[in-house]
Image (cartoon, rainbow, N blue to C red):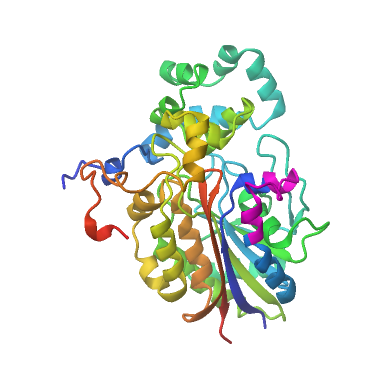
Amino acid sequence: MKDELNPFDDIPGTTLFDAQRSRQGYHLNMFCMSLMKAENRAAFKADEAAFLLKFPLTDAQRNAVLVRDWNGMIALGGNIYFLAKLFSTDGKSFQQVAAIMTGASQEDYAKMMLNGGRSIDGNRSKSQPATPPESKK
Amino acid sequence: MARLVAGVATSHVPAIGAAIDLGKTGDPYWQPLFKGYEPAKKWIAEQKPDVIILVYNDHASAFSLEMIPTFALGCAAEFAPADEGWGPRKVPVVKGHPELAWHIAQSVILDEFDLTIVNNMAVDHGLTVPLSLLFGQPQEWPCQVIPLAVNVVQYPPPTGNRCYNLGLAIRRAVESFDQNLKVMIFGTGGMSHQLQGPRAGLINRAFDTAFLDNLTADPRKLARMPHIDYVREAGSEGIELVMWLIMRGALDEKVREVYRFYHVPASNTAVGHIILENEA
């Protein structure tokens, strides 16, 4: 394996909240943290763009928040437990936002969970999409 | 002397707390899950621990990115339920055991586990949901609780091996405390779940079953498992399972598995629960 390749990047559809992303997303996540306070939630809801100017976000981060691009926020350093403050402000649940991030409808996602969740088979590795037979149970 | 008699592992899904708080435990969606905890409620009511050391993770409630302690031990006399953005859960204030907590802090630090001492910390669903699952909705929690918050949000969390060895050190600390106390330890979080990105909703029953099997029978094997295996096999948030190894390390090498329960789903998560007793 090449040194520069992060082995976690081989896991499909998954973003590790590592040092680089924590540095990149610091202000985005701290904006979300500010929504723990009722007065900040009210101010944000009254004028989202103006409230966001209090935090030194990049234009891309600011835009991802305004259009609620959840996967975009994660790609720009957002962490799901911080983003939870934002979607709770919107009145959304973890399951609703998870469905959005997977591109599934709420109904289809809820049905998938009731049927045992997303299978690990085919979801382990980008480089080896098929599950090796010996690891099947 | 204080005795460490048993360990409990359980998931701490926030939606479970909401179901309890909103009176939905009898709903068809939730009923099978709460039924699965009935034997555990009966067991702990008979056992009557004096103190629970409760290993959990904070979910950007008490700690943000301003401070990220890897291990934070709550040494205060009480801990208020955190406001996680929709008002604090209406559950009793958690009473600590400052004497034992400070003794554990001193003992494990001199044992070379340099954890953070915390005197003011709100506790979120990671800590209160396990208490609700085991004790229901009492006016006061029936025992004292020492919170041990572990960072599993910012990569890297502590290794499974570090967690297991911290458990061993906590055992030494508890059993050198000069008061006659019956102590339990809880490991919480997990099992397989992923809350983010296109792979959200991942559940791996085979991994979870093997983890439960090895937790009882071969925890040292689990302690060698690298982070990437947790993330790949159990999902990005499945890495919370390293916390179960602190609980396991604090028990005897050989334990008696007295109860196990597994259920999918609670919201996005596979719920796992196990009770282990020391033989003595």
What's the magenta region?
A: B18-35
Q: Compare residues B18 and A55 and report the one nearer the observer.
A: B18
**Horizontal side of residue A55 vs B229, given as left or right:** right
Locate residue B115, reporting x and y percent: 53, 60
Residue A45 lies, with reference to residue A1, above or below; the image says above
Q: Is residue A46 visible?
A: yes
In the image, is residue B18 above or below residue B252? above
Q: Residue at the bottom extreme?
A: B280
B19 part of magenta stretch: yes
Q: Name the outermost residue toward the left.
A: A2
> A49 or B211: which is nearer to us?
B211
Considering only vertical position in the picture, is B56 above or below A17?
below
Quarter containing the C terminus of chain A:
bottom left
Q: Is residue B124 visible?
A: no
Report x, y in % for residue B83.
69, 40
A106 left or right of A39? left
Q: Position of residue B253 (x, y in %)?
A: 46, 80
Tell me which residue sits at (67%, 70%) in the image: B100
Q: Is residue B181 magenta?
A: no
Towards the viewer: B30 or B251? B30
- Furthest residue in direction right, as rendered: B139
The image shows residue B249, relative to residue A32, as above or below, that is below
Give x and y (percent) for residue B148. Answer: 59, 59
Residue situated in front as seen by the camera: B143 or B274: B274
Count of numbered circles in the view: 0
